[in-house]
Image (cartoon, grey):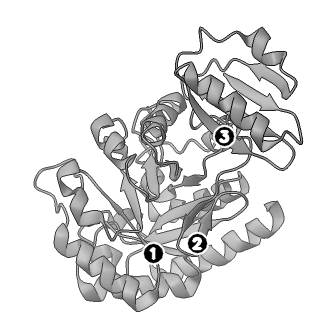
Amino acid sequence: MIVVLKHGVSEEKKAQLISWLEALGLRIHISMGEYQTVLGLIGDTTGVDMDLVGSLEIVDSVKRVTEPFKCCNRKFHPEDMVVEVGDVKVGGGNFVMIAGPCSVETEDQIVTVAKAVKAAGAQMLRGGAFKPRTSPYDFAGLKAEGLELLKIARKETGLPIVTELMNIMDLHLFEDVDVIQVGARNMQNFDLLRELGHLDKPILLKRGLANTLKELLMSAEYIMASGNEKVILCERGIRTFSDYTRNTLDLAAVPMLHQLTHLPVIVDPSHATGIARLVPPMALAATAGGADGLIIEVHNDPVHALCDGAQSLRPEEFSVLADKVRAIRGIVA
């Protein structure tokens, strides 16, 4: 249920209403807009008399929310969420480019790529230290050592780092990571999501291989209901019957998610297509479609990459793409 207050309501009267609603066992999410204040009532609202609340002098309207997701529902939070990562802002008209290799391999590799993507305009560095692989025989990352190499690259370039957490047991290693990524395979790892909800750190949540948008939002709800509202959603392609690309990039998800939620939505064209030459056109399409950012795999030597070289751009290719992305942004922003 949401309660929209009239413009100019005093803080005293607002506090009295909130106190009364909390006494009913509800948790109140407050969204302060320029012209109105929205109170999101979270919990069992079946006992709330809508007519009584609506009749109050300070109340403009009362509506029931039928969707199961509340914290991440745009009805609760009409204004776009802006997630801040240091000096970098994501959402609310702010566009972010995140780039780097699928896996951190060596110090020279990650620092070289970090410097290249920064020069091209990337604002954050991605790189996998813990890698979920389909085959148990594939390279699964350098783990803790990889995190340390990412920190070296951050020190060299100033770029905030984005990297994937797979297991709650490793959470202590991520204290100095700027953005924690939840990969597609862990989108419904609810114990992990609850733990991330206790952090004061941005979370990049990727859509699962075969999950609906409602399921993605319910996963975001787990994080936000536990107290962490700094969530960035990522469309990275879903499993369909198509056999020409790694996945099928669902670009319609971008405007639909913007309609449903106030959270920023970025797109991963690398994992969506699995083919480097398809990454630029899909990145441009995502930008034109209103995405709040892109996360793109870039490797200085894709042929010899230990992971996902086939979908990785070379630094010079990323630089060309970044220029085109900025041109598209100049039109649609």
- Along the line of sight, the residue nearer the viewer: 54 or 132: 54
- Which residue lies at the image location 53% right of the left edge and 78% below the top edge? 317
Q: Is residue 272 left or right of residue 305?
A: right
Quadrant placement of the C terminus? bottom right
Q: CA distance from mark 2 to mark 3?
A: 25 Å
- Which residue lies at the image location 59% right of the left edge and 15% below the top edge? 45
Say the numbered circle drawn on residue 84. Answer: none
Describe the element under mark 1 as helix, strand or loop. Answer: loop
Q: For the residues labelled 1 and 2, say whether their Cβ atoms are less than 8 Å apart.
A: yes
In the rendered view, tell whether residue 278 sits above or below residue 237. Answer: below
Q: Residues within 10 Å of mark 2 (few under 14, many from 20)?
A: some
- Displayed quadrant of residue 153: bottom left
Instruction: Please name the residue that numbered disc 3 is placed on.
Output: 30
Q: Is residue 103 left or right of residue 212?
A: left
Quadrant placement of the N terminus? top right
Q: CA distance from mark 1 to mark 2?
A: 8 Å
| Residue 144 in view | yes
- Which residue lies at the image location 38% right of the left edge and 59% below the top edge? 180
- Along the line of sight, the residue nearer the viewer: 204 or 201: 201
Instruction: Please name the residue that numbered disc 1 is placed on.
Output: 160
The residue under label 1 is which amino acid type?
Answer: Pro
In the rendered view, tell whether residue 316 sits above or below residue 45. Answer: below
Instruction: Please name the residue that numbered disc 2 is placed on.
Output: 88
The residue under label 3 is which amino acid type?
Answer: Ile
- Displayed quadrant of residue 90: bottom right
Q: Position of residue 57 (x, y in %)?
A: 88, 24
The residue under label 2 is which amino acid type?
Answer: Val
Q: Position of residue 306 (x, y in %)?
A: 23, 69
